[in-house]
């Protein structure tokens, strides 16, 4: 398989050079910065620079100005306040993104167009990402596997880092606040017109917090992390532009499991990208991108006497060369074609071997302004995979401009997520309870071994069931939207969505063990849907006052669960001394951690005379369930649900001269907490910040 | 408010249903087959973590439906408890260590429904313990309980009724209400950790071997 990889790179170089032979040496700068100044331009939706208002799929972007106005330091601070997005804690404390009711593992998170990895339990922790050097954040809703392949079921979030502006600039930001949280950022950029480079450093430390007193554990343990990013952009030769970027992230955090077990966890992550582009012909751009990333997490626990209790490692590699050709014509639209290869490897404690994946892929996309009013984007991607069935992911989207105020949008696309390494190769036996979890591909080897060792009482799911490969989880997403621009100041958008997901992977018992416990493995079972409505309203009341309000209505259900309720086979009980009663269809509450209503309201204000700007923001979440509390294994309305709550944040900044900016703010003004259940809410946080910049 | 109304409705609903069925059957029988509550049946278990995989051990606590009490008798017992495992005095060893010898003809099956509405005895449905597993399967969602990995708590599955044939061919139906001491309304981490393995259950005993109903 390694041969394929090398072969692919040679092919890319060959194609690259071949096209050069036939090309004139006529160079066009790819980053037309001037166009971006006029109106928000995003790249994630189509992989071409497009004005956000002209796109047929639901997209959203968060500008740097907003990031600075709210004094955000981490990505979760920011995404949590956007319409239809919430961050949800996983059991490991990670903050994942829920979008259109889909779990964090179904949304692809990218930095400058390349994916982040390191989902040790499915969640990509948004706290890993500093927002210090971000130009904008782009969010595309709806399945986007036609461009991005794996993981882009619910949509994509693309974090675009800043490009140096002309001249030499440096900037230092410092923010300190409650929980002894200190965030220091330093940035230096140089753009001399020929080449540009930048360096960004960030250190964040916090003592964490403890919501539940009296036990030996802290809700969030003290941590310190560092981010470093270096970017360079220049001309490799007169016809080829080269971009190199590298990012490094390190975190060290205490880890306590009980009064007698303590240790630490450590994360090391790096990403490197080499990006070459040139335009050998007018309208014709070719790009070659080579991306490599590694995410390594280790943790250990020691006994009080210093002897080792446990150690675990998670070490993931991801490499991807991609060759991309873009042909943009004024009359007949824009074509994008691409070939790429993904290589992934994971070494992990409790794993069956060291799995490797190879996945060559190709995609093509066509977009065109068919008539003055109609814009269409059509694309498809084909992923071959060394471990799963191949995936074909088409997408079609259109936008119709009814008149100068109203436009209609719709998009229909497929998304998929391949089973993760854990679901295939896990080989884990719990040392305290004694149950075993085997990855799907580990079962045919490990189960007979356990049988031979006399650990298995009986097998409930015969081995024949593991002959067919585990299927990727797949979705079909439909979005129907309406944008109304009442005036240049008042805008309103509504989007209706439906995500139909099948082959969701769940666990089941495959054998009983002689110790009375079970062996679990993964299988394709669940059929889930999410549907709802997102709406966003914004009004620029004056040049110095902007109001933004958003709301999402969501229904997210498991179809099989709904059928069980419909059939009357689910029962409930209020408490052990009250009688059992049959639950009706309406009693089914849906998937865990989904609120039917989420809403946000934001006011951004400026007071130019005093050089003051700031914001007042509120987010609301209606009731949701974290897990079944009455034993029927389903979430129903008699379960102990998390009560609805609202969080209010306030920020204020004062610019002093041209070089200094002072900030202060309060997050979670009303000090709302729910100790046992909302581990991501530490209560009221007060902070101050100082910024110094040379220009 | 909505919850309460629904709850009231459902309670009223099944009370009505119940009273109807009572009217139809023979009234004198009912006095005999009343539902009896057993509280805090303690079923401890030892677990040896030095072995991989860990091995659960310890004596099973035996229960006799005829007397309605726990017993140390080697022969006059119907079901026995240890941790979340429930064995019946019928069939053969499943391989679990420290299980008492089965010398009766007990059997069991699980049925979904409201306890009072489960009235028929399906004589062909009884299965016994054996090397292929227990008549009342272990494991979350397989038998009588669901395991909540967040709280590490065991919840009896509402609507899961254990229908039993006793060691001497009588019948009983059992509804497990709680796995925790004094059957608390809400289980928290402390309770889940300290007060476990105390069974509270309801049962109805049918001492007529020829009966088809409870």
Image: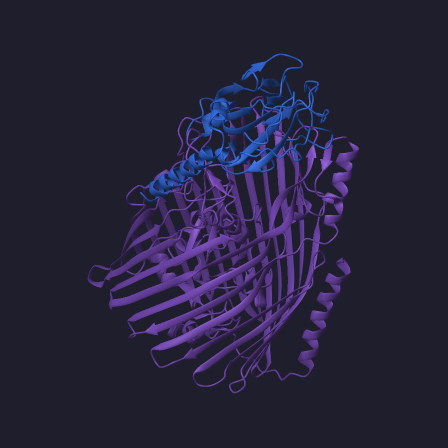
Residue A411 location, x and y as percent? 49, 70
Residue A137 location, x and y as percent? 44, 61
Please indicate whether residue B104 sits to the left or right of residue A227 in the image. Answer: right
Chain B colour? blue
Q: Can residue A451 be seen? A: yes
Please indicate whether residue A11 sits to the left or right of residue A293 in the image. Answer: right
Residue A572 location, x and y as percent? 46, 39
Q: Residue furthest left?
A: A609
Please indicate whether residue B211 sits to the left or right of residue A173 in the image. Answer: right
Answer above or below: position of A247 versus B159: below
Which of the two residues, A577 or A461, is positioned nearer the viewer here? A577
Q: In the image, what residue occupies the spot 45% across and 61% down?
A: A189
Q: On the rendered image, what quadrant is the C terminus of chain A found in? A: bottom left
Chain A colour? purple
Q: Can residue A74 be seen? A: no
Which of the two residues, A681 or A68, is positioned nearer the viewer here? A681
């Amino acid at each position: 398989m390694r041969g394929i990889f090398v072969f692919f790179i040679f092919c890319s170089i060959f194609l690259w050079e071949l096209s050069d032979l036939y090309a004139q040496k006529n160079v066009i700068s790819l980053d037309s910065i001037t166009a971006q100044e006029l109106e928000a331009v995003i790249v994630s939706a189509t992989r071409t620079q497009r004005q956000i208002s002209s796109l047929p799929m639901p997209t959203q972007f968060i500008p740097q100005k907003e990031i600075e106005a709210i004094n955000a330091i981490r990505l979760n601070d920011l995404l949590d306040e956007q319409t239809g997005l919430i961050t949800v804690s996983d059991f490991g404390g990670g903050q994942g993104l829920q979008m259109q009711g889909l779990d964090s593992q179904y949304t692809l998170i990218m930095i400058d167009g390349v994916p982040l990895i390191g989902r040790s339990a499915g969640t990509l922790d948004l706290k890993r990402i500093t927002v210090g050097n971000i130009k904008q954040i782009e969010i595309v809703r709806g399945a986007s596997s036609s461009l991005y392949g794996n993981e882009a079921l619910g949509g994509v979030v693309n974090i675009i880092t800043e490009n140096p502006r002309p001249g030499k600039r440096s900037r230092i930001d410092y923010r300190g606040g409650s929980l002894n949280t200190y965030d220091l950022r330093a940035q230096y950029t140089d753009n001399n017109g020929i080449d540009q480079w930048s360096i960004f450093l960030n250190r964040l430390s916090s003592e964490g917090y403890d919501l539940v007193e009296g036990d030996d554990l802290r809700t969030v343990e003290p941590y310190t992390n560092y981010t470093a990013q270096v970017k360079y952009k220049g001309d490799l030769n007169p016809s080829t532009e080269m971009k190199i970027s590298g990012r490094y992230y390190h975190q060290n955090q205490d880890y306590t499991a009980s009064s007698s077990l303590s240790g630490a966890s450590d994360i090391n992550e790096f990403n490197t990208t080499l990006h070459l582009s040139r335009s050998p012909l007018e309208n014709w751009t070719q790009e070659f991108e080579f991306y490599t990333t590694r995410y390594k997490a280790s943790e250990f626990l020691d006994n009080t006497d210093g002897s080792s209790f446990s150690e675990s490692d998670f070490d993931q590699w991801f490499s991807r060369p991609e060759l991309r050709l873009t042909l943009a014509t004024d009359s007949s639209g824009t074509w994008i074609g691409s070939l790429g290869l993904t290589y992934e490897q994971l070494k992990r404690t409790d794993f069956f071997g060291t799995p490797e994946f190879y996945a060559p892929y190709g995609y093509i996309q066509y977009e065109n302004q068919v008539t003055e009013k109609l814009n269409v984007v059509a694309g498809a991607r084909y992923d071959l995979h060394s471990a799963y069935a191949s995936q074909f992911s088409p997408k079609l989207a259109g936008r119709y401009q009814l008149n100068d105020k109203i436009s209609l949008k719709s998009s229909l696309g497929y998304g998929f997520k391949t089973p993760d390494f854990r679901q295939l190769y896990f080989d884990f036996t719990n040392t305290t309870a004694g149950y075993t979890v085997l990855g799907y591909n580990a079962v045919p080897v490990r189960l007979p071994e356990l049988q031979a060792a006399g650990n298995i009482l009986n097998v409930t799911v015969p081995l024949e069931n593991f002959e067919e490969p585990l299927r990727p989880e797949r979705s079909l997403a439909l979005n129907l939207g309406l944008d109304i621009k009442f005036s240049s100041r008042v805008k309103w958008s509504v989007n209706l969505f439906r995500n139909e997901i099948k082959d969701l992977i769940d666990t089941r018992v495959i054998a009983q063990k002689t110790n009375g416990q079970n062996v679990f493995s993964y299988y394709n079972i669940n059929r889930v849907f999410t549907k709802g409505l997102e709406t966003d309203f914004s009004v620029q009341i004056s040049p110095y006052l902007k109001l933004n309000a958003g709301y999402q209505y969501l229904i997210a259900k498991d179809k099989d669960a709904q059928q069980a309720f419909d059939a009357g086979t689910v029962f409930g009980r209020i408490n052990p001394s009250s009688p059992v009663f049959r639950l009706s269809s309406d009693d089914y509450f849906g998937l865990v951690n989904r609120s039917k209503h989420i809403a946000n309201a934001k006011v951004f204000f400026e007071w130019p005379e005093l050089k003051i700007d700031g914001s007042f923001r509120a987010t609301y979440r209606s009731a949701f369930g974290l897990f079944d509390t009455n034993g029927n294994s389903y979430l129903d309305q008699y379960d102990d649900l998390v009560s609805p709550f609202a969080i209010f944040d306030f920020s204020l900044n004062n610019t002093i001269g041209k070089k200094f900016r002072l900030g202060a703010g309060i997050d979670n003004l009303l000090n709302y907490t729910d100790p046992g259940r909302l581990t991501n809410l530490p209560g009221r946080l007060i902070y101050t910040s100082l910024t110094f910049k040379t220009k | 408010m909505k919850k309460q109304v629904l709850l009231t409705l459902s309670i009223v609903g099944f009370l009505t249903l119940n009273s109807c069925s009572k009217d139809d059957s023979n009234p004198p029988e009912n006095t005999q087959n009343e539902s009896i509550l057993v509280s805090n049946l303690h079923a401890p278990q030892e677990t040896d973590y030095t072995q991989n995989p860990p091995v659960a051990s310890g004596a099973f606590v035996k229960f006799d439906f005829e007397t309605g009490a726990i017993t140390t008798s080697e022969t006059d017992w119907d079901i026995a408890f240890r941790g979340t495992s429930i064995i019946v005095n019928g069939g053969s060893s499943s391989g679990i260590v420290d299980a008492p010898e089965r010398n009766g003809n007990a059997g069991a099956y699980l049925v979904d429904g409201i306890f009072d509405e489960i009235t028929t005895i399906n004589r062909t449905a009884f299965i016994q313990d054996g090397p292929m597993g227990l008549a009342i399967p272990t494991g979350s969602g397989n038998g009588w309980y669901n395991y909540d990995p967040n709280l590490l708590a065991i919840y009896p599955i509402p609507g899961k009724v254990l229908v039993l044939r006793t060691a001497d061919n009588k019948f009983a139906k059992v509804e497990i209400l709680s796995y925790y001491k004094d059957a608390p309304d809400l289980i928290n981490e402390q309770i889940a950790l300290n007060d476990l393995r105390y069974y509270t259950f309801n049962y109805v005993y049918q001492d007529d071997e020829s009966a088809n109903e409870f």
